[in-house]
């Protein structure tokens, strides 16, 4: 992961792009890339989307991850740490015995 | 990274949630979490958002990453590989000499 | 408004497109068009965006409205009625005396 | 339509909220409300969503429309005019004879 983040930061430093990368616009960028990913599934079933748009799905998912890792890096967040903390939080919000096989939101369990 | 993906998959298998996780709804989920992240910046500057909403920013960014890693896992994609491939693609779309210090889209360079 | 909705429905009926327009994909479409609108503001202040992207802002805002009116029409919703109902609801959630000059969410008032 | 926009503007003027409403944050708001609308369809078919979440769908669709009308008003755009202009543009991008019964994007027709 550290290696990956280093490459991503190298990419933007080579282009002198950090000046544009304030957290608010990075959050906008993550949302825009998530939409471009989702566009591959518009008017389609999951199966049709995978068959017709596999390459673009890969690229847009990569973009969501790249911008997310940039924002984490700029906010000095450790990616593994925030993911593990969130999984623990979800573990308490969605206890196994109550949420097994059930897609309800935690406030409706 | 492999360790992290294993924990995320463990979380949903404990709850028998993979039955809900088709790629189209996971792509929707990534987009929804990206919006919840962005909501922290609504009506605020980056600085105000960081000061007031730091904990929630961490949690929502973690959610974007968690759903993105789930989708990558379900599509049998290697996260590091798709990120490196995308960086190489961007490297060709945005050559350093043309894009240095310039936020224009590649089709306007 | 009725006239406008009639024209929008004529447009898709001419192309036999209603078969694709289930509410879930229309909701996805509204979200995608909202992102395309937002893209005009990425890496920019409001002023820069208005100056450089005015025409595209108009077009994408029109797309958000067109898909929203399609969804309302398909769900047999009266647009004016749901807007007025929501304004009344917001009026109770955000009483003037508490929310004047204050951008806090209703659950933090 | 004019009557509706007047009511929406009255609502925010009563609360002195125009000071927060710059176009960039309004575009963010439209995107966030579109996501809240879409959330009603997450992990569901269109039919399940309509059955379980009808009231929330109405409210979130109203919010998308309210913020869109605010942005149009702040940018001095005539809503009917931009919609009609966009329908004409789409009419040329998607000629009836080529796009009938076909959900392909215009650049793939």
Image (cartoon, coloured by chain):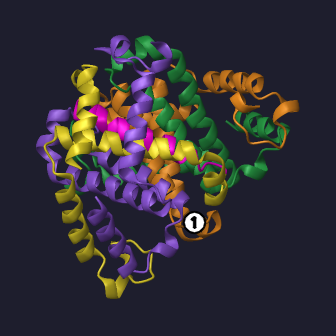
Chain colours: A purple, B yellow, C orange, D green
In the image, residue C12 sits, relative to residue A57, either above or below, namely: above
In the current view of this chain or complex, which residue is farthest to the right? C97
Asked whether residue C2 appears in the rendered view, the answer is no
Q: Which residue occupies the foreground of this view, C22 or A13?
A: A13
The answer to whether residue D6 of the structure is visible from this angle is yes
Q: Residue at x 34, y 11 (%)?
A: A97
Q: Nearer the viewer, residue B13 or C47?
A: B13
Q: Position of residue C2 (x, y in %)?
A: 56, 29
Does residue A61 appear left or right of residue D79 in this picture?
left
- In magenta segment, residue B33: yes
The magenta segment is B21-43
Circle 1 crowding by C-alpha within 10 Å: few under 14, some 14–19, many from 20: many
Q: Is residue C82 above or below residue D75?
A: above
Q: Which residue is mark 1?
A: C49
Quarter of the N terminus of chain C within the rendering: top right
In which quarter of the view is residue B66 placed? top left
Magenta span: predominant SS is helix
Q: Is residue D109 left or right of residue A35?
A: left
């Amino acid at each position: 992961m550290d290696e990956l983040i280093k490459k991503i930061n190298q990419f933007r430093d080579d282009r002198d792009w950090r000046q544009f990368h304030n957290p608010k616009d990075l959050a906008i960028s993550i949302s825009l890339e998530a939409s471009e990913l989702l566009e591959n599934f518009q008017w389609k079933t999951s199966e049709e989307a995978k068959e017709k748009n596999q390459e673009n799905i890969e690229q847009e998912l990569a973009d969501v991850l790249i911008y997310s890792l940039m924002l984490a890096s700029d906010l000095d967040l450790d990616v593994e740490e925030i993911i593990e903390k969130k999984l623990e939080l979800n573990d308490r919000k969605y206890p196994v015995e109550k949420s097994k096989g059930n897609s309800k939101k935690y406030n409706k369990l």
